[in-house]
Structure formats: structure tokens, C-alpha cells
Image: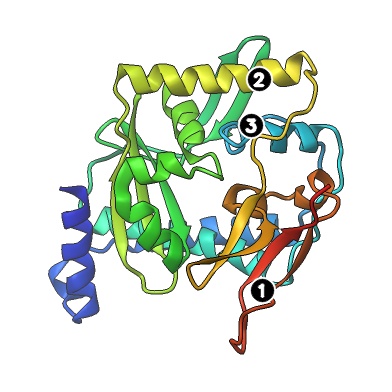
Amino acid sequence: MLELQIKKTLEKLSNNEGHELFVDDAWIDEAGEYLKEALKRQFRRTPEAPRLRASNIGRPKCQLQMALAGEPEVRRPYNHIIRMVHGDIIESVMEVVLRIAQANITGGKNKVKFEVSKTTIKGEDDIEIDGKIFDIKSCSPWAYNNKWSKGYEGLKSDDSFGYIGQLYTYSHGQGKEAGGWIVVDKSSGEISVVEAEMDEAEKSRVDAMITDTVQTIEEDRPFERCFEAEDDVFGRKPTGMKRLGSSCSFCDFAKACWPTAEYKPHPMSKAAKPPHYWFIEED
């Protein structure tokens, strides 16, 4: 229902039929103020002490152990900041679209505290609709078509960024239900609403995962990689090389965790812009 509301509204806006909709200037002004603060935050970033928080609690334990141990991060490419700002823009725009679509917005931007073991996890949610907590996410076309399009199970199978743990923390920390994710393909502008299919068994699984992560950090348990290198395949044929999978490839500590790793173009690709991977030399 929510997805249909959004798409019908955007169809009207895309066809110059905005006069048929109610658009409050105050909503646009609020979005502008949010984006202004987001730009200040993004452009004035400075290093800060790593800590467990809602936005990272669902990530792999090994990544969090590396961060809290102060291991050096991979230097990010120049376009990283644009990706981050792009996400802020999409979030601010989507909140206006949701209001125009007359979604039943019951809250949002709530400060959340979630007590786990001896640790307090803090964060701020995006938006509450019909009493349920939703996150607004922008993503690449590949992620939109290969992960988000498969719904909750698709996300669950490859949740490198810890989105499930994040949403669970936001919702459970307030004693509310998790609604899901409003996902925008940042290239095509396509939108999907992916519902969080969290029955009691799934809530228990996520809760246990978060608790284990927190206790791993609290007890300073020995570091263990959560993933192994994968066999490289090119043109549907194994090449005999090894490379890091998607979870490790998106990790800020790929090089610290895999000292022999080298980020380079695929040697068999003839493309003008060949795909890059973290290739490793086996010990």
C-alpha cells in the first residue's frame, strides 16, 4: 500500500500534475533545513573515536573489532563524500514525497537508546509510519536489482552494512515494530518498499546476533575473520585466483585484515573501465 501511494504521487509529479496534490511549503522548507545541516555535518567531518552505535551494530563482528582496535582504514575514493551527500539528499526529498503522498507519518528523527548487556547503543531513526519504524536508503542499481528486489530474504542473505540490526535497534529500542526500508535506486530513481519480515523467531535471531557482537567487544575476545577469500570467477569460469567477497570488499579494514590484498582491475577484463576487486595472495 505504501509503495503504491508513493508511486502514484511521483507519477503525478512526473507528469506536471502537482496542482492536483497538496504540497505544503513548510515541508519543503524543513527538507531544506535538514539538508543544510547534513551538508555542514558531511563537510566538517573529523576523526572520532569508534564506538558501537545503531548504524553499525549489525555489521560483521570482525569489522567492529578492527574499528575499536584502532586499525587503519582503507583510504576512501574521492567520490565517497558525494555518495554520502547523495544519501542525505534522497532522504530529505523522500520525506517530502511521503507527506505529499499522505502517508500516515506518526513520528521520526527520534533519539533511541538500546541497552544490550553492559552497553548502551544509541542512534536516531529516520521516519515512523503507521506506528512502525522505517529507514530510507539509497543504493546502487546493482544493489537495487540484485538484493533489495529480493525483499527481506535478499537483504538477509547479504547484509554487509548491517541494515537489519540497525532497524531492529531503532524499533526494539522504542518498543515499536520494524516497518522496513524505503529504498531508492540513486541512478534510475526507482523506489521499492521492502517490509521487515520479523516474526518472533527472526527477532530472536537478530537480538542474539547483536548481543553476541556487544559481548565480543565487551570481553575483548580474540579477533576472528567472519569470512574467507573466495574463488575468482570470470566469464563463468574459475581463474585460479582468490579475491575477497562483497562483505570484505566493502569493509574499511580490508587491507588491515588481509595484508596481502591488492585492489586492482581484473586482469582478464578487456573493458575500458574494468571491474576492480581485492585480490589476495594466499599464505
Q: Cα distance, mark 1 to mark 3? A: 35 Å
| Residue 186 % position (x, y) | 44, 68
Instruction: Give the vertical position of 261 relative to 220 (above or below).
Output: below
Instruction: Give the vertical position of 61 relative to 172 (above or below).
Output: below
Choose mark 1 or mark 2, whichever is in front. 1
To which residue does mark 2 refer? 214
Q: Amino acid at mark 3?
A: Arg
Q: Nearer the viewer, residue 191 or 270?
A: 270
Q: What mark, if any, has residue 193 been given in the picture? A: none
Q: Which residue is located at x 49 percent, y 40 percent?
A: 163
Number of residues whose C-alpha sits closer than 10 Å to that of mark 2, classed few (under 14), some (14–19) or many (20 or more): many
Does label 3 or label 2 sit earlier along the sequence? 3
| Residue 90 % position (x, y) | 45, 62
To which residue does mark 3 refer? 53
Does label 1 or label 2 sit earlier along the sequence? 2
Taking the view exactly as shown, the residue that stands out farthest to the bottom is: 272
**SS of the residue at dot 2?**
helix
Image quadrant assignment for residue 171: top left
Q: Cα distance, mark 1 to mark 2? A: 37 Å
Q: How is the image coloured?
A: rainbow
Q: With 172 as the anchor, is 261 left or right in this view?
A: right
Q: Are marks 3 and 2 in contact (CB under 8 Å)?
A: no
Q: Nearer the viewer, residue 245 or 28?
A: 245
To which residue does mark 1 refer? 266
Q: Nearer the viewer, residue 113 or 225?
A: 225
Q: Which residue is located at x 37 percent, y 55 percent?
A: 183
Q: Is residue 176 visible?
A: yes
| Residue 211 % position (x, y) | 58, 16
